Amino acid sequence: MKFLYGKQDWKTFERGEENCYLMTNGLGGFSSLTITGSCSRNDHAVLMACVHSPNHRYNMIHRLEEVLYVGESKIYLSSQDFSGQEGREEGYRCQSGFSYEDYPQWTYLAEGAEVVKTIALMPGENTVGITYQVRNRSGKEVRLEVYPHLQFVPKGKQPDREQAFAVEEGKIVSGGQTLSFRTNGDFHELPVVFHDNLYYAYDACDGREAIGCTVVNHRVSCTVRPAGEARLEMVYGMGQELPAAAEILDAVKQYRDRLREQSGFADETARTLAANANQFISYRESTGKQTILAGFPFFEDWGRDTMIALGGCCLAARQYDTAKSILQTFMAYCEKGLMPNLFPEGKQAPKYNTVDAALLFILAVYEYYKKTGDEDFVRDAYGTMAEIVKWYRNGTDFGIRMDTDGLIMAGQGFDQVTWMDVRVGNILPTPRHGKPVEINAYWYNVLCIMEELRRFGPEAEMGYGKLAEQVKESFGKQFWNEEAGCLKDVLSGTKADGQIRCNQIWAVSLPFSVLSPEREKQVVETVFRKLYTPYGLRTLAPEDEEFCPFYGGVQLKRDLAYHQGTVWVFPLGGYYLAYLKVNGYSEEAKEYVRMQLENIEAAMREGCAGQLPEIYDGENPVSSKGCFAQAWSVGEMLRVYDALR
């Protein structure tokens, strides 16, 4: 699927900064700019390299300043906002097109000169290729000058004015980092100039640092005679040997073609999502295996997010070896029945502050087995699965333990262990201490899975089935809210119990039904009436006194709104799967869901081309917010497309 944008998409400078692209390299590095080529965020970059996979990132080349001379006319092709009275580069005025399929491409038309620019990131390398195809029909001599704006600092930092930049035999050296380069253009070393006036509108609106700094120390240029044509190539990378730009473009295209083909989807949107889901897959040096990065540009790899995203990003996309590698990593780090929420970095120990990751691991193993029939892997994983159940029954850290009614309790003090995990100092906006609804739905499904798979373990009978029956009975009696026609969100003895939240949808969408068919249908209908939007589910019903209609502002304000009505994309996958389930996967139900998924196609065009974001406002979800590309958002939609095959 090719995403095409035209001048109406940047009719103003501000409109041009609403959308961006994303390319990743499988190491944690990425390239992302707006569709007008500007940096509207500190985290935008032509080359965000990763020097220690997947989270030690360096913003090497932040942006490109591009100037076209047509005769005596000086015309900016680049666009960038600046602080104060500095004005703007307004290349968007002569930009005629932008497209993204496997890599971004910009087209410009200025006084009879045509320029086509591409940027591509080499898979498996911290290497970026940049090309400019210049066609001169102006009747005058044309010269294109490109000034890479450098940073050479860790992601989120700014260059220091004392930072030295040197050019040494095809290399740029600064801040302990070395960037090799090659070009067929004219390379000119320049005196080092600091530009400390970049303005980031999309950081300013969220209370982050709004002003940035870059460094220019060289220029690359080419000259084109009247009626002539030229191709300027620039390649920058962290390795010693750099490929040609054409090799990078070919490698990206072939790699993504394989991903689309391997997914087996006939639907074009699903094929596109399958290829773009791979943008979240990264190598992790500390484990020597694959991992899933939760979201761009902000997030790292977290256990809960990985387990939720894996079903779609790996299994629905038929990336079975990747799924297996990730699951094996988690098995190696299981401790006291818990799976890591954050993996070790350097000498740091893993963090285990999640109640759902371990349960979701068992669900993921089961889904992997159903997809592949890999009995050997289930035998290898079974011991870890049994260990998880044992610890949850007997009790483990963070107040996680089974109560006498068979239900799971979790959370204590200031520990936030469900996915609604915001903590602001001593404020817990959504504490959910007690018995969370989705955790107990997972727990019931885990017990059913263990009963079904117990032939793979040494124990002939561990009472999984009998315990599952107890859990189902307790769940039905204690979680059902007859007045609201849905499930309580948590059993805690507080007003939070009766809040209508999206977490209940997973009690329906999971493979083993903890509710009667009649109650499952009621849950689906209540969720639709109270929480459904075309782009995601609200985290809290609008009539609730704690509902926050808008997400934005300083971090405190954002955190307090994060799970208090904000629309999240990923639970929408659970809703569609639940809808299909309660309607018997009929052709009518499938056709209805396909129709609803057309909204997702529209969402993939807004924010980040080809991707799905983290969140939207709760009241009127029209603009993506948070991470512009979120793994579990993409993964859950892929699971829906998988169910519609």
Image (cartoon, rainbow, N blue to C red):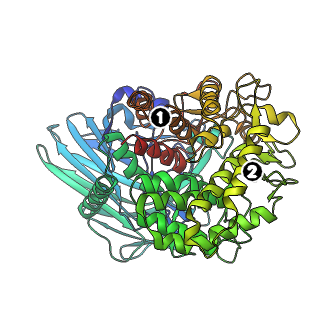
Disc 1 versus disc 2: nearer the observer: 2
Q: Give, as a three-letter code, the residue at label 1.
A: Gly
Residue 57 in picture, x, y percent from top left: 55, 64
Spatial CA span between label 1 and label 2: 26 Å
Q: Residue at x 75, y 62 (%)?
A: 392
Q: Is residue 551 above or below residue 252?
A: above
User: Mark 1 Cα within 10 Å, few/some/many (few <14, many 20+)?
Assistant: few
Q: Residue at x 70, y 63 (%)?
A: 463
How packed mark 2 is, by other alpha carbons closer than 10 Å (few <14, some 14-19, many 20 or more), is some
Q: Can residue 149 be seen at all in this image of the molecule?
A: no
Q: Which residue is mark 1?
A: 584
The residue that disc 2 covers is 470
In the rendered view, tell whether residue 414 sits above or below residue 325.
Answer: above
Report the quarter where the C terminus lies.
Answer: top left
| 1 or 2: tag closer to the N-terminus | 2
Residue 562 drawn at (x, y percent): 70, 39
In percent of width and height, residue 406 lies at: 78, 53
Q: Residue at x 62, y 22 (%)?
A: 529
The amino acid marked with disc number 2 is Gln
Lateral position of residue 623 relative to residue 268, left or right: right
Residue sitting at x 74%, y 25%? 484
Left or right: where does residue 520 sit relative to residue 276?
A: right
Query: SS class of the residue under badge 1?
Result: loop
